[in-house]
Image (tube, rainbow, N blue to C red):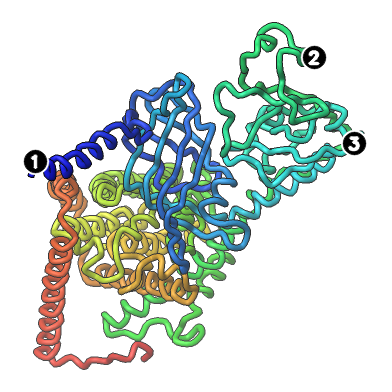
């Protein structure tokens, strides 16, 4: 019996002992890796792995391990993308998002798509002694959006073409195996070419051109200021994906590239002759560029595209929208006052705004003699620029945006301050007491109401973690209970607070005190005539669309379609068009509300308006700021958030139904005829 028991126990003990002796050879997780930034990247952006205690000056090896998600494509699982030669400091590891990395993440040429990476970022440093394991660390659950080539690709393509032309002139052919960390690997050098005369060889890695670090062929752009171009190369460099092990011999650069440098190799003296290895050194070559004529700077093409987009926004959208808003306001106000409104110029008077514009152009432009004429002439255009610049970051659709800036919402707040300067300038330069009072009122009103309005926007930024307008829209959903307006009671209150402050900043009734005709004749615009007079109101009408478009993006889900994710919407062009229509419908509904308020509520007094801001809105905005911080820290579960959103939306629908019931009751009690046809 003991023999049988011993026969059973001995194999088990043997297996345990053997398993304890086997080394897993797993690198130790000794690096303190905290985070990865940014969460969105495009070519030229700097990628950073943030941590503590990194070896300074050492070359890090970074691996992106996870899955790639692209719109309309199946997810690519188990991807490993290596990045070598990443520079490190004590608290971060930096690398550039090059075109090679963009191809690895987003695909190449026409197949390149916006890609979301979800997975882990693993960092490792080589061992300090032979035979030891590398030191590693990782950050788990990273989600990064890598952007495919955008509309700016035309500019980048022009620079790349110029770079290829310069390489062709030098006689250099670039291979397809350039490392992802940057640089261009020379595959061939044409005999008797400028590069051959300068000593460039096949296999060299071009790391810099005229002092500029080379990430792609777009960086090979001679300035033409000198007959020679300084080309920095790394000779004997190997591919980043197969780094040279420590202690391995360096390859030669003679006729036999495979021959290793040894003690007996000719030309080796001193330190190299001892048989010890040395890192690959960079050297500079002077390549003759005599006879090469640089093309016009490709930045001119970029500037031309920017001007073209700006002109298209102003001429094809902003101007018609501002004019159409005037027609809509006149028709709606007429119906509210039992009138017909404009109905002569064009069908239903639709072309009256064009007739008004032509009339203003033909009117005499009078500049008062005693005015400050340069500032008097400049003021209307400054107001116009302040409003029109906001259209550059207006998210009309998922990809229908002129410039999706990282600081988009901050840009809106900044450029609209030009309106304050323009109105104050116009009032002061007119040398008229009524104009001066109107300008001072406008400055006081806009600056005061900007404080609670900006805090309301900051609360939304706190919840999304981004200043990019498109990201704020993506953080919401298509269904109403997924909008920020119904996210919680705080954001519900913030919507009405921000909308009211936007009315005050835009000098819309009942806050139109800077141009109160019963007190100040016409306020800051009293002395203006002709087209300059129209520019003030042109900016005001355009600002109505701006405030409603921003409100739609911040609180009402923007271009999101109910029941669809942004990825599904991005994969279909018709769905993107539907999203653009949804954004317009939301904005124009809010425009109708703005017009409704103007022709319903009486103008308030200046003291009442300032008391409302400083005694109510400013304290309320700070309280909302604190509560939003508590909400962000709490971060309720998605199920709880969904129930809160549905509850807030249901409560709002009950209020709307009660409102319409009261309107219907009042109309019946007054026995007022109702005409639902808007084209009477």
Q: Mark 3 points at which residue?
A: 191
Q: Residue at x 23, y 58 (%)?
A: 500
Which comes before the other along the chain, label 2 or label 3? Answer: 3
Residue at the spot x=34%, y=40% of the render? 139
Q: Which is more toward the observer, 92 or 605?
A: 92
Q: In the rendering, at what x and y percent does residue 471 appear? A: 37, 55
Q: Distance between the residues labelled 2 and 3?
A: 26 Å
Q: What element carries label 2?
A: loop
Split into 4 quadrants, where in the image is the N terminus? top left
Of callouts 3 and 1, the N-terminal one: 1
The mark lying in front, picked from 2 and 1, is 1
The kind of secondary structure element at disc 1 is helix
Query: Residue 59 at what x, y percent from top left?
Result: 50, 27
Element on which disc 3 rests: loop
- How many other residues sit within 10 Å of disc 1, few (<14), some (14-19) or many (≥20)? few
The residue where tag 2 is placed is 266
Residue 43: % across, % down: 55, 46
Residue that numbered label 1 is attached to: 2
Determine the residue located farthest toward the right in the rendered image: 192
Q: State the mark number for residue 601.
A: none
Q: Can residue 527 be seen in this view?
A: no
| Of callouts 2 and 1, the N-terminal one | 1
Residue drawn 78% across the image and 44% down it? 295
């Amino acid at each position: 019996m003991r023999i049988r028991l011993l026969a059973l126990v001995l194999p088990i003990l043997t297996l345990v002992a053997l398993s304890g002796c086997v080394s897993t050879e797993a690198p130790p997780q000794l690096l303190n890796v905290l985070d990865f930034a940014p969460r969105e990247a495009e070519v030229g952006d700097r990628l950073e792995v943030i941590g503590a205690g990194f070896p300074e000056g050492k070359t890090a090896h970074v691996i992106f391990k996870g899955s790639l998600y692209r719109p309309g494509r199946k997810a690519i699982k188990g991807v490993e993308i290596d990045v070598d030669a990443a520079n490190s400091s004590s608290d971060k590891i930096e690398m550039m998002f090059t075109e090679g990395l963009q191809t690895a993440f987003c695909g190449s040429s026409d197949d390149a798509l916006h890609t979301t990476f979800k997975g882990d970022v693993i960092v490792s440093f080589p061992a300090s002694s032979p035979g030891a394991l590398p030191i590693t660390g990782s950050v788990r659950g990273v989600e990064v959006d890598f952007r495919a080539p955008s509309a700016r690709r035309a500019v980048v393509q022009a620079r790349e073409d110029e770079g290829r032309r310069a390489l062709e002139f030098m006689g250099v052919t670039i291979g397809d195996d350039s490392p992802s960390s940057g640089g261009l690997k020379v595959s061939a050098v044409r005999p008797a070419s400028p590069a051959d005369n300068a000593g460039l060889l096949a296999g060299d890695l071009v790391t810099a051109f005229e002092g500029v670090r080379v990430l792609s062929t777009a960086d090979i752009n001679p300035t033409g200021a000198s007959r020679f171009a300084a080309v920095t190369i790394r000779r004997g460099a190997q591919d980043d994906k197969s780094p040279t092990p420590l202690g391995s011999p360096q390859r030669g650069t003679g006729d036999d590239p495979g021959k290793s440098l040894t003690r007996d190799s000719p030309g080796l003296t001193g330190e190299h002759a001892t048989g010890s290895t040395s890192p690959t050194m960079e050297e500079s070559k002077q390549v003759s560029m005599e006879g090469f004529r640089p093309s016009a700077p490709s930045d001119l093409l970029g500037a031309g595209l920017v001007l073209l987009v700006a002109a298209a926004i102003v001429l094809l959208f902003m101007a018609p929208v501002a004019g159409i808003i005037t027609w809509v306001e006149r028709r709606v106000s007429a119906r509210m006052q039992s009138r017909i409104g404009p109905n002569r110029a064009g069908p239903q008077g639709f072309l009256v705004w064009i007739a008004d514009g032509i009339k203003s152009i033909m009117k005499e432009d009078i500049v008062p003699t005693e005015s400050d004429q340069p500032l008097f002439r400049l003021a209307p255009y400054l107001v116009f620029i302040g409003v029109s610049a906001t259209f550059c970051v207006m998210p009309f659709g998922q990809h229908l945006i002129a410039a999706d800036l990282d600081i988009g919402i901050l840009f809106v707040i900044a450029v609209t301050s030009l309106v304050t300067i323009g109105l104050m300038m116009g009032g002061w330069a007119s040398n008229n007491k009524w104009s001066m009072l109107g300008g001072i009122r406008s400055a006081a009103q806009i600056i005061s109401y900007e404080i609670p309005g900006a805090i309301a926007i900051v609360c939304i930024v706190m919840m999304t973690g981004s200043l990019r307008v498109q990201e704020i829209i993506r953080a919401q959903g298509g269904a109403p209970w997924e909008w920020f307006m119904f996210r919680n009671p705080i954001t519900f209150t913030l919507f009405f607070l921000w909308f009211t402050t936007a009315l005050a900043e835009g000098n819309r009734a009942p806050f139109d005190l800077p141009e109160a005709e019963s007190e100040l004749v016409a306020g800051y615009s009293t002395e203006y005539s002709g087209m300059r007079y129209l520019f003030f109101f042109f900016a005001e009408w355009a600002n109505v669309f701006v405030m409603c478009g921003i409100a739609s993006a911040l609180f009402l889900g923007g271009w999101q379609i109910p029941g669809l994710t942004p990825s599904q919407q991005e994969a279909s062009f018709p769905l993107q068009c539907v999203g653009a229509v949804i954004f317009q419908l939301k904005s124009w509904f809010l425009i109708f509300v703005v017009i409704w308020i103007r022709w319903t509520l009486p103008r308030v007094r200046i003291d009442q308006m300032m008391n409302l801001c400083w005694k109510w809105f400013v304290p309320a905005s700070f309280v909302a700021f604190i509560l939003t911080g508590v909400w962000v820290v709490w971060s309720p579960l998605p199920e709880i958030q969904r129930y809160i959103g549905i509850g807030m939306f249901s409560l709002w629908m009950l209020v709307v139904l009660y409102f319409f019931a009261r309107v219907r009751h009042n109309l019946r009690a007054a026995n007022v005829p109702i005409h639902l046809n808007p084209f009477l």
